[in-house]
Amino acid sequence: MSTPQTQRPQPDPIRFYGTSWVDHTRGYGARRFALGLGASLLAALGILGLKLGYNGLTLSQSASWLRILVIVAFAGCTAMAFTRAMRGWTRPRPSAGEDEAAFRSIKIIGFVGILLAYALRSAVEAPGERMRRLDHEAAVEQYERLTSKRSRNPSRRAGRAGAGARRR
């Protein structure tokens, strides 16, 4: 029986970038610029939509406390969504599964914050690139360490074979 040959670790693809983030090829810079610009435009459209909604509240002559509550809710959710998105692309989260489900409604309400975070992160690198790069480099380093080691000293192997032959 032979042991299966381990292959060099492959990088994980990032949405919209594939694996071009590894060596910055295949239009990586142009793609980063276009996606950052697109996220900025979508954030501006989102702000416009929120402004139209607020104008609807004003025209309906709703109570001033309700208008203030809506502004505070959208501003708070936008700020939380922005910070969580930026932190998520630079540092690992310990329990991402449960945490993401709990903050889903905040992310939906604060969609402008997520779009702004994506646009700002795209100005520096692909969102999530730092985390993927650290993981990939650690996996490659471990692979190199495991494949470069010799499991046994070749001179001892020859000695054992000779010793085994003498015992017979």
Image: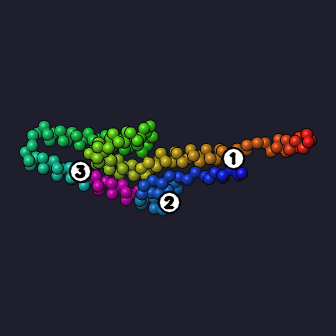
Q: CA distance from mark 1 to mark 2?
A: 29 Å
In this view of the protein, which residue sits in the foreground, 156 or 137? 156
Residue lying at 69% horizontally and 46% vertically, measured from the top left: 148
Q: CA distance from mark 2 to mark 3?
A: 34 Å
User: Is residue 110 something one can see in this rendering?
Assistant: no
In this view of the protein, which residue sits in the foreground, 17 or 103? 103
Q: Give neighbour class at mark 3: few <14, some 14-19, many 20+ (Cα, 10 Å).
A: some
In this view of the protein, which residue sits in the foreground, 64 or 5? 5
Q: Is residue 112 left or right of residue 21?
A: left
In the picture, residue 88 is in which quadrant? top left
Task: Give the amino acid type for the residue marked by disc 1 in the picture.
Answer: Ser
Q: Which residue is mark 2?
A: 25
Question: From which residue to which does the magenta span run?
Answer: 32-44
Looking at the rendered structure, which numbered label has been put on residue 148?
1
User: Of circles 1 and 2, which is in front?
Assistant: 1
* Secondary element at image label 1: helix
Residue lying at 78% horizontally and 42% vertically, measured from the top left: 153
Residue lying at 21% horizontally and 39% vertically, measured from the top left: 72
Q: Which residue is mark 3?
A: 47
Q: Give neighbour class at mark 2: few <14, some 14-19, many 20+ (Cα, 10 Å).
A: few
Label whose residue precedes the other's in the sequence (2 or 3): 2
Looking at the rendered structure, which numbered label has been put on residue 134?
none
Label whose residue precedes the other's in the sequence (3 or 1): 3
Label whose residue precedes the other's in the sequence (1 or 2): 2
Residue lying at 21% horizontally and 53% vertically, measured from the top left: 48
Task: Give the amino acid type for the residue marked by disc 2 in the picture.
Answer: Thr
